[in-house]
Image: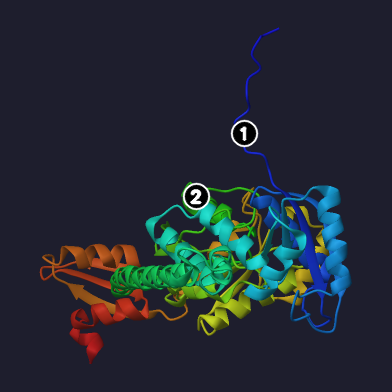
Amino acid sequence: MSRFEPISTKPVPERAILVGIDLGREDWPLEESMAELGRLAETDGAVVIGELTQRLDKPTPRTFMGSGKVQELVRLVHALEADVVIFDDELSPSQQSNLEKAVGEPVKVIDRTALILDIFGTHAKTHEGRLQVQLAQLQYVLPRLRGMWSHLVGEQTRGGIGSRFGQGESQLEVDRRLVRKRISWLRKELDQVETRREVRSKARWESGVFRVSLVGYTNAGKSTLLNRLTGAGVYVRDELFATLDPTTRVVDLEEGRRITLTDTVGFIQKLPTTLVESFKSTLAEVRAADLILNVVDASDPNSEREVAAVRDVLTQIHADQIPSIVVYNKCDLVSPEERSRLQELRPDSVMISALDGTGVRGLLLKVSQEAASGDQTLTVCVPYEKGLLLKMVHERCQVVREQYTQDGLQATVKASKRMAQTLAPYICEEQAE
């Protein structure tokens, strides 16, 4: 036996107690919302060791939950030796402070918003993603700075050397100015990112490429579908918010048309408004799409609530008028009867399994039909010196027939509205008449 026992450097998971309040007006039943909160906590590396719930008509202003339940929470925290208490709803700064005083140090009290922000901070990989997460985190922290320097402010009441300078309040104001300054800088940086994204988006629009965005509840399988269709190699894992940063790849349809497919950040119920605001440059990819694929986990009993949650976010970002297709993923995990029920519920939906490829060809056919819905049939004559345009004709259009003439390529094509605008100067005279 070795004289020296190795010391493990593996992080010790925090022990979490979940708290939920049933106000009787939420769209999601409390037990299902709490189950999702548990998955969020596990995604963030915590171990759930207990739950506490209460039925109230409205939150208590001081501690969100009733005073009796607060005492029950304190006893539970001490009995289970918890490290963190996580509330399913957003707490006000004063409620969070009062609850932390009740449970005592070093136990932390956080809410669903802080938990999601922490997960985002772990999973953001790109420069843009980190900027967006940091902005959301600072917007959340700013109103909660009060009280962080109360131990210094308290010294003023006792008098003594240095007390006349009010160092606690001064430090608080310094912190607030620093946070506001950082928020301002982050917004400017993200505005520049959005400007660059708009330039790329405009270039894709002018190229005539049909743009498709994948949206959906987190963990619905969007990244798996992107990998299946494009071989993108995007990180996939069975956890909430596994990927945050948008990924765009090119897909060549069977008819010869080329489209772009963009995977975006997953949505969730009670998605913090600060996150929607901070991720506006990423969500701009959704607003710029010609078609939205709303990917839904068919095996999830809350699938219809998840569709509604995604629709709410699309409405917030003004993308609810864009044509969309509901794609029920993971159909290999549901019974034939359940598949029939979902198909009857949404006749225009598509059933697939991104994992094994079932139904994917049918989905691409449906996308092809949507992409071709606004096509125009044109006969054009493109000069040979317009090499880029000739390439676009073959990549962006469906060529019905073509003929090489002395003046250039004469072709009858089915073109999208944008490509028709690009080809307008080259329409053959006999068609123009």
Find residue 187 and report its image quarter: bottom left
Q: Nearer the viewer, residue 302 or 228?
A: 302
Find residue 380 and report its image quarter: bottom left
Relative to residue 232, is residue 297 drawn left or right? right
Disc 1 crowd, CA 10 A, few/some/many (<14, 14-19, 20+): few
For the residues labelled 1 and 2, say whether their Cβ atoms are less than 8 Å apart. no
Q: Which mark identifies residue 234?
A: 2
Above-or-below relation of 206 to 32: below
Find residue 176 and report its image quarter: bottom left
Relative to residue 382, is residue 252 drawn left or right? right
Sequence order check, earlier mark of 1 and 2 = 1
Above-or-below relation of 317 to 355: below
- Name of the residue lying farthest toward the bottom: 433
Q: Which mark identifies residue 144?
A: none
Count of number-bearing discs = 2
Q: Point out the image quarter for the N terminus.
A: top right
Question: Visible in this render: residue 348?
Answer: no
The residues tagged by marks 1 and 2 sit, at their Cα atoms, a distance apart of 27 Å
SS for callout 1:
loop
Q: Point out the image quarter for the C terminus.
A: bottom left
Could you say where residue 330 lies in the image, as x and y percent from the top left?
A: 70, 56
Could you say where residue 93 lies in the image, as x and y percent from the top left?
A: 63, 73
Q: Which mark identifies residue 10?
A: 1
- Name of the residue lying farthest toward the top: 1
SS for callout 2:
loop
Q: Nearer the viewer, residue 27 or 68?
A: 68
Above-or-below relation of 210 to 106: below
What residue is at 69 percent from the left and 49 percent from the top? Answer: 46
Question: Visible in this render: residue 341?
Answer: yes
Relative to residue 375, is residue 242 drawn left or right? right
Could you say where residue 209 lies in the image, as x and y percent from the top left?
A: 36, 69
Q: Residue type at mark 1? A: Lys
